[in-house]
Image (spheres, rainbow, N blue to C red):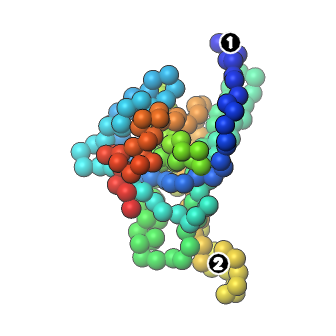
Amino acid sequence: MAIAAYSKACSKNVGGNSAVYLTEATNVTAVTVTSGEISAALTMASGKTFHEVEADLDSVTHTQEGTGTQTNISYTHRVEMIFSKPSVDLNTLRDSLADGSPCGLLAIVTDGNGTSWLVGYNETDGVNRALYLATDSLNSGAAPADDGGQAITLALECNSGYLSLPFDSTIGATISGGTAAFITYA
């Protein structure tokens, strides 16, 4: 394969992420990819959807860390979220992620530029290298003034030989606009 040409886009770049949606990997039955983008709405098992997860503002990170050798590269995909104040509802989310982890989880992360990314899926492995719950921790802090006290950090992670896939602008607009049929919005 030849080195690809790359032309820098002269446009604003905004860091961070604005939304995260999660589902069990087995809930997604088909993904259509055209030219490196998800080009059709995800096909879901009957009655199943992604669910919006409202983490603390500016606490969601999506990372892809590539490491390799001369003939091989792999990527560690990670979606990390912080939630303030433990609650019964947050415990339910934590339990559901632990329960779904053995068969895998998928995440849709909408970045600060408005692009939505499917994390935990690739065209070669499908959902066989989906995300799993890698971190579930509570830090109470020691004093009432402790920054980040009573914070829960959840991190999903997987390793694959491929990058996360973006949704095309049409599907991405339905995700950001709150009208994607395959998502249950909070």
Residue found at x 67% / y 87%: 144
- The answer to which quarter of the image holds residue 149 is bottom right
Rendered-image quadrant of the N terminus: top right
Q: CA distance from mark 1 to mark 2?
A: 50 Å
Amino acid type at circle 2 is: Gly
Q: Secondary structure at mark 1?
A: loop
Name the residue beneath numbered marker 2.
Answer: 149
How far across and down, in percent of the image, does residue 122 sit?
50, 32
Pick whichever of labels 1 and 2 is earlier in the sequence: 1
Say if 47 sits above or below 5 in the image: below
In terms of depth relative to the viewer, which is nearer, 130 or 85? 85
Residue shown at 68%/12% (left/top)? 2
Q: Give the image quarter of residue 3.
A: top right
- Residue 82 position, x and y percent, is 58, 65
Front in this rendered view, residue 56 or 31: 56
Q: Are marks 1 and 2 in contact (CB under 8 Å)?
A: no
Q: Callout 2: helix, strand or loop? A: loop
Point 41% across, 72% down: residue: 89
Instruction: Name the residue rendered at 52%, 48% in the picture.
Output: 109
* Kind of residue indicated by mark 1: Ala
Determine the residue located farthest toward the left in the rendered image: 46
* Label 2, residues with CA under 10 Å away: few <14, some 14-19, many ≥20: some
Residue 47: percent from left, percent from top: 24, 49
Residue located beneath label 1 in the image: 2
- Give the crowd class for mark 1: few <14, some 14-19, many >=20 residues within 10 Å: few
